[in-house]
Image: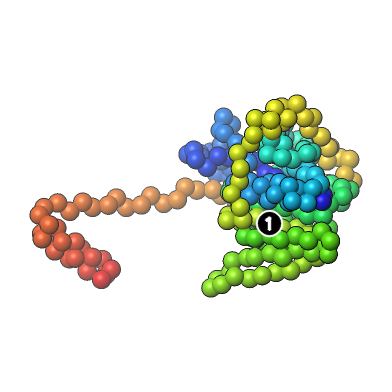
């Protein structure tokens, strides 16, 4: 089975991010970068398919040299091939441009299953997997929590959570699937995997070789402003004996029209 996993590098949200003075972007210098958490479920599912059916995994991303750290993490977790599409010529890109570039590269690779994270934790558009499928003219099932693949019949059965229930979707292969939390439990990289990742050469493709016109890579989305969430009002501490504090709490809740 030929499996492709599309990966994205994102800022580590465990740290406090700062907004640049122009209010259009966050400060990206000297901050830790990690694999998009939803992509971890995608690479784990790819590894499970490989263990069950055999085959190989190709991890693909668009980015500068820094993103190779994330690609090596994919190799350590079981990827057999890592491809970086060099985007130094792109000052700005949105999910549409990223999807176009990924789809154009994938078009020239043999594949049965394409896996992506449900969304990225930075912009959260949740569109890339669906647009890749549209460019390739293949089915897409998004936000899956269970995947059953049958290579013999060339189809797949997926479970998706919907409001008030569970949706079961069947589709033909090849197809794109976007991974939701709960699809699996991502594993830790093994020592042998880490050593393999250090030695493996990452394939680098230039965007100029993909045949795009400048107008094809013009972003459709423009961020006009970023701002911090409004500060929450400080809480109030009610002191005193238990009966007195209970009465005071009820009185405050009534004044606030909570009860």
Q: Is residue 253 left or right of residue 129?
A: left
Q: Nearer the viewer, residue 21 or 8?
A: 8
Q: Nearer the viewer, residue 61 or 208?
A: 61
- Mark 1 closeness class: few <14, some 14–19, many ≥20 residues within 10 Å: many
Residue at x 78%, y 51% (from the top left corner): 53
Quadrant where the C terminus is found in the figure: bottom left
- Is any atom of residue 212 visible in this view? no
- Is any atom of residue 201 visible in this view? yes
Residue at x 84%, y 46% (from the top left corner): 105
Query: Relative to 68, is 184 above or below?
Result: below
Residue at x 76%, y 35% (from the top left corner): 88
Give the colour scheme shown. Answer: rainbow
Residue lying furthest bottom:
164
The residue where tag 1 is placed is 178
Q: Nearer the viewer, residue 55 or 32?
A: 55
Query: Relative to 200, is 183 above or below?
Result: below
């Amino acid at each position: 089975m030929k499996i492709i996993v599309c990966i994205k590098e994102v800022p580590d949200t465990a740290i406090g991010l700062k907004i640049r003075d122009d209010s259009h972007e966050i400060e990206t210098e000297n901050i830790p970068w990690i694999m998009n958490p939803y992509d971890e479920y995608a690479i784990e599912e790819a590894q499970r398919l490989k263990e069950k059916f055999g085959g190989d995994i190709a991890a693909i991303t668009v980015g500068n040299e820094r993103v190779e750290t994330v690609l090596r993490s994919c190799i350590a977790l079981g990827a057999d091939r890592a491809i970086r599409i060099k985007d130094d010529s792109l000052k700005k890109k949105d999910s549409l441009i990223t999807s176009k570039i990924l789809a154009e590269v994938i078009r020239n690779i043999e594949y049965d299953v394409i896996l992506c994270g449900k969304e990225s934790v930075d912009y959260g558009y949740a569109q890339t997997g669906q647009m890749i499928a549209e460019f390739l003219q293949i089915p897409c099932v998004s936000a899956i929590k269970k995947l059953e693949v049958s290579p013999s019949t060339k189809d797949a059965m997926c479970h998706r959570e919907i409001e008030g229930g569970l949706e079961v979707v069947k589709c033909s292969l090849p197809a794109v699937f976007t991974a939701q939390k709960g699809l699996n439990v991502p594993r830790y990289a093994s020592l042998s995997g880490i050593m393999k990742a250090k030695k493996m050469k990452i394939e680098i493709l230039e965007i100029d070789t993909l045949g795009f016109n400048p107008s094809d890579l013009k972003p459709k989305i423009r961020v006009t402003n970023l701002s911090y969430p409004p500060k929450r009002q400080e809480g109030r501490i009610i002191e005193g004996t238990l009966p007195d504090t209970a009465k005071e709490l009820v009185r405050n809740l009534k004044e606030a029209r909570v009860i």
